[in-house]
Image: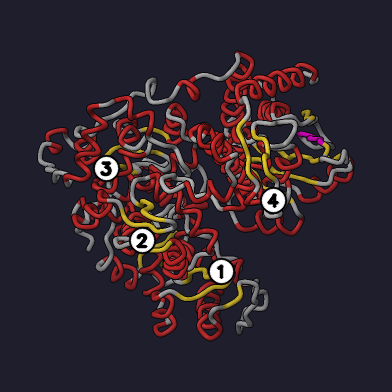
Amino acid sequence: MKNSSIKEQRNMWSKQGWSIPDLRGSKHSWFTLVTGIIEYVEKNQPCDLKDIPEIAGNSDVQPIKTYFPFFRGIGLMRKRSENAVLTDAGKKFVNSKSKSYLADLIQSNYRLFGEVIALLEGESMTISDVNSVICHQYGLNWKHLNNIRGRMDWLEVLDLIRPIGNNKWEASEEGIESLNRWCIVTPEAFESVDTDNENDIALSDPPAEIASMLQRLSESPELHNKRNTYNIWVPSPNRIDNLRTIIQFASERVAKDHLYQFIEDEFSLKKSSAESMMPFLKASGLLEEVGRSIYIATPAAKAWLETGNDLDFIRILHSNMRFVGEMIRACQKDIIRNDLYAQAKQYGLNTEKARWIAGFLIEAELLEEPQYLHLKATPLGNVFIKALPLAQADVSISKKEEKPSSQTEEHQENLMEKTIKLMEQASVDPSAENKANGVAFEEEIAALFCLMGFQAKRVGGAGDTDVIVKWKDGEGKAFTAIIDAKSRNSGTVSHNDISDVAIETHRDKNNAEYAAIIGHAFTGDTIRNHALKKSFALITVEELGNIARAAKTPGLSLEEIALLFRSPDGLSQLSEIISEKQRELELISLVVTKMYEQEEKLEEFGGISPRDMYFSFENTDISPSREELITAFETLAKPEIGILKATNHRVSSENTTYMITDGKYRVARLTAIAAAIEKGLPN
């Protein structure tokens, strides 16, 4: 397989991830640990993730959930509710307990694994030598050895390389044998392809059902405004294939509950996860509601099932969602992901939504990752977008999204983005802004927390923390968090960069309830173990920037934002709150729109209830539950808001009827009150 074609190599690369998940403990115990845990799960499945297996020769075994990211990453386990079960690959490993099979799994799931063996086949090298050559050949900027060391540790454990003295390594016979059955991705797979080669690429025409969608978009550019920006969620990996499986199940009419049950069983998901897919399935043009809680694949989706062509899925996605074909256009030249995400914002998409779209395009081989955190259109991608009607960034956003409601908001938003950018730059440049080591990074962190509404200041200096952040909860109770800011040229922070004792001392000195370490990225298991043990939050600058951007739109309280300081699951809790609040706002907009659409009927029938509206949502993309609608109605009917007015109170909240009031007056009044409050706030 070493002589695989360029296309095969590119396909392999697109399916692989970058970072092999950590497996705690000494590397000399890794294989027995893997074998022992897999055997335990096989005997006890479905196995509680909190279980701690007893494994001979391993005295410090952690709960299975500690190791689960590794097992899921290489395809040996999957999650069913809160339990772990074996995949087919896991069952096969139980029978073989083979190092070569485990190596095959790592090779198929992660980049630059077998490629290291290929490098050592011809010449013995040190770890540093391997890192230098790999970085040069594959255009990487790894300034530390952890990425290569992790791969070489596994190669050693699996007997694929061996030490020969003087800190040098060479490929073993087992390693060379593995190369003969693996697809190895060579640097030549990323060399520029002549434009002439694009002329050799012939695309199949889309089916009529999909072609008509593209034709309408081409003939009516204003339809670009109607392409939506809903959240995206699909089971990973192989997300396009997973979508195809779901749509195949819905190719005939299916009740919503049956569809949810299928998704839960097929992908081992909770019901809430299955339900969260519905808005995307409808908004992307794959599924439609044809009766009360009855769904079926759209004609376009059925046409995609018949062709089996991933490009037809992308065509459907482009017709219904923003920044799909436009993303390929933005990547015609090699682009850094953060720069691409900045462009996505012009189309109304946040970073997370842009990541999802990029993932689809990579799976469809329309984008590739020539370097770590870089994206570039493939020759296929360049040819593909020539036949797509594309929007321009300056006309793709509705006026409501295009301009903030006031100059103050615009200034605040610009200041926020500027601060985030300076913070990101300073996180990898300790002497940024020509200031002393780390000072600029600390100042920008403090400034960003101030912009979010916290009391924050840089302290710095010997004997104290870098940044102090203070806030009060809804009951007026005061809280304090200290921040240890770590700016590193390498871009990564390891345990060697921090002092547990110093952080504990600084926390006690400032009577702080929380402590956090903020850096560009974190590497190594030790820092995560210590952070968990000491209740330190590890926050990357990307996470902090995204939280700052998301904080204002759904109206997060300081108490909610401060969840990011809570270890170990504060960030995930905050992410869920943001999603819930964004959905709540979408529902409120939808309820108001529906109330105005049915204003004449409301006069005739004396109002509409949440239950009535629940049944009227046959053609919407948001699929609200009755409980969500009740909450939206009651929120809009609160005296301080007053957009809705209850006309007939019933014992059951879902049957209480409401009328719409003068919405524009209420909005003006609320805006005036908000402006008055903002004017009275301290600068």
Find disc 3 in the rendering and name its residue: 315
Find disc 1 in the rendering and name its residue: 81
The correct choice, above or below, for 184 with respect to 547 in the image is below
Of the residues under marks 4 and 3, which one precedes in the sequence?
3
Span highlighted in magenta in the image: 467-471
Q: Nearer the viewer, mark 1 or mark 4?
A: 4
Q: In front: 169, or 23?
A: 23
Residue 382 in view (yes/no): yes
Q: In front: 609, or 348?
A: 609
Residue furthest top in the image: 407
Q: Residues within 10 Å of mark 4 (few under 14, many from 20)?
A: few
Kind of element beneath mark 2:
helix
Name the kind of residue labelled 3 in the image: Arg
Name the kind of residue labelled 2 in the image: Ile
Q: Nearer the viewer, mark 2 or mark 4?
A: 4
Find disc 2 in the rendering and name its residue: 246
Q: Residue at x 69, y 31 (%)?
A: 642
Q: Nearer the viewer, mark 2 or mark 1?
A: 2
Find disc 4 in the rendering and name its residue: 650
Q: CA distance from mark 2 to mark 4?
A: 40 Å
Quarter of the image for the C terminus: give it: top right
> Residue 190 lies in magenta, yes or no?
no
